[in-house]
Image: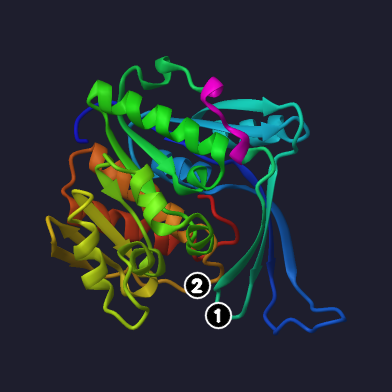
C-alpha cells in the first residue's frame, strides 16, 4: 500500500455526545459531568487523523441525516478530508453517547441511525480513482445494507489492485454478528487492525490467552495483523508469527474515545508514505497518545 495515491475510507459519521464524569455514576440522581457534542464516527475519525498526520489525499464515503449534514461536512473539510456524504431521507445521523470515567475509559451507547444504512447504490467506482488504499470501518459489517456496500467496495478494490484494511470496531457487535461470519466477510483484506478483545474473539481464544497467540493465529488468514493494546502499545503479526512489538507513547489520558481510530489514521498515513509496519505502528501510537489527551475522537 505504499507509494503516491489517495486513502479512501468507507465508514461511519456520527454525532458524539461525550460526558466525562470524574466521580462514579450515581443511579437515580445527578452526576456532575463535562459534556460536549462533537463530530465523530470510527471511519470519520480515522480519516481526520490520517489527514492530520499524513500528506496523502484522504476521502470519506459515509451516510448522514439531513439535520446535521452541513455541520459534519464542514468539520470534515476543515480537518482536510474530502467527504462524500450521502443524505438519508429517513434516519437522522447516528449518535453515540460516550460515558468517560475517571480512568479515561469509555462506555458507548450507540444509535447507528443513518450510518449503517449505506448501501451498494451509494458506491461510485470513481471513488477509487487515484486511490492507493481502501479502509473499511468494521461497523459496516454489522448491518445488512452496509455490509453489502463494504463487500462491493472490497471487490472493486481487489479488482484494481488497491490494498484494503479493516478495523473490527466493536467486540460487542462482533459477538452479535458472529466472529466467523465477520472473518468470512473480510476475506481478501490485507490488513486487520483489532484491539486485544477483538483479536481474541476473532481468533476463537479464551480471554486469559495471550494476545500474541491471537495475533499470530489471525495473521494466518490476513497478511498483516496489527493489534492495538492501549497503554501497552501494539503487536504486529505476519505469516503466523509476531514480527514486532511497539511501545505506546506516554500521555496523560483524559478521554480514550477515538484512540483506536487515531491509531488507525496515523498507521495508514505512515504506510502510504512508505513506512514499514513497525514504523507505521509507532506513528499510530503517537496519534493515539495525542488523541487521549483531549475530549472526543478527532484531532
**Which residue matches tag 2?**
253
Looking at the image, is 179 positioned above or below residue 121?
A: below
Main SS, magenta residues: helix
Neighbor class of circle 1 (other Cα within 10 Å; few <14, some 14-19, many 20+) is few
Give the residue displayed 38% in from the left and 39% down from the top: 135
Is 91 contained in the magenta span? no
Neighbor class of circle 2 (other Cα within 10 Å; few <14, some 14-19, many 20+) is some
Range of magenta residues? 116-122
Where's residue 230, x and y in %?
39, 70
Q: Residue furthest right?
A: 29
Looking at the image, is 195 positioned above or below residue 136?
A: below
**Which residue matches tag 1?**
103
The first of marks 1 and 2 along the sequence is: 1
Is 118 contained in the magenta span? yes
Whether residue 125 is visible here, answered yes or no, is: yes
Q: Are marks 1 and 2 in contact (CB under 8 Å)?
A: yes
Where's residue 150, x and y in %?
44, 35
Give the residue displayed 40% in from the left and 50% down from the top: 182
- Left or right of residue 92: residue 265: left
Given residues 165 and 219, the one toward you in this image is: 219
Where's residue 258, x and y in %?
51, 57
Q: Quadrant of residue 275?
A: top left
Q: How does the figure colour the protein chain or chains? A: rainbow
User: Split into 4 quadrants, where in the image is the N terminus?
Assistant: top left
Amino acid at each position: 500500500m505504499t507509494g503516491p495515491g489517495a486513502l479512501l475510507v468507507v465508514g461511519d459519521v456520527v454525532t458524539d455526545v461525550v460526558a466525562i464524569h470524574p466521580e462514579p455514576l450515581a443511579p437515580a440522581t445527578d452526576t456532575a459531568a463535562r459534556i460536549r457534542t462533537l463530530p465523530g464516527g470510527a471511519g470519520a475519525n480515522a480519516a481526520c487523523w490520517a489527514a492530520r498526520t499524513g500528506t496523502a489525499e484522504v476521502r470519506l464515503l459515509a451516510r448522514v441525516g439531513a439535520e446535521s449534514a452541513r455541520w459534519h461536512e464542514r468539520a470534515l473539510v476543515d480537518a482536510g478530508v474530502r467527504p462524500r456524504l450521502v443524505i438519508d431521507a429517513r434516519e437522522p445521523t447516528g449518535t453515540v453517547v460516550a460515558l468517560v470515567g475517571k480512568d479515561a475509559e469509555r462506555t458507548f451507547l450507540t444509535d447507528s441511525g443513518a450510518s449503517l444504512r449505506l448501501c451498494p447504490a451509494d458506491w461510485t467506482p470513481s471513488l477509487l480513482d487515484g486511490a492507493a488504499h481502501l479502509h473499511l470501518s468494521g461497523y459496516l459489517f454489522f448491518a445488512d445494507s452496509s455490509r453489502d456496500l463494504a463487500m462491493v467496495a472490497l471487490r472493486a478494490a481487489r479488482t484494481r489492485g488497491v490494498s484494503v484494511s479493516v478495523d473490527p470496531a466493536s467486540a460487542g457487535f462482533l459477538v452479535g454478528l458472529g466472529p466467523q461470519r465477520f472473518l468470512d466477510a473480510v476475506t481478501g483484506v490485507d490488513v486487520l487492525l483489532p484491539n486485544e478483545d477483538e483479536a481474541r474473539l476473532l481468533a476463537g481464544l479464551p480471554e486469559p490467552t495471550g494476545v500474541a497467540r491471537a495475533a499470530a493465529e489471525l495473521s494466518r488468514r490476513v497478511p498483516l495483523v496489527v493489534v492495538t493494546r492501549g497503554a501497552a502499545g501494539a503487536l504486529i503479526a505476519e505469516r503466523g508469527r509476531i514480527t514486532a512489538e511497539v511501545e505506546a507513547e506516554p500521555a496523560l489520558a483524559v478521554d480514550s474515545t477515538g484512540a483506536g481510530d487515531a491509531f488507525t489514521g496515523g498507521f495508514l498515513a505512515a504506510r502510504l508514505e512508505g513506512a514499514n509496519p513497525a514504523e507505521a505502528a509507532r506513528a499510530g501510537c503517537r496519534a493515539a497518545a495525542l488523541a487521549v489527551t483531549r475530549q472526543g475522537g478527532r484531532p
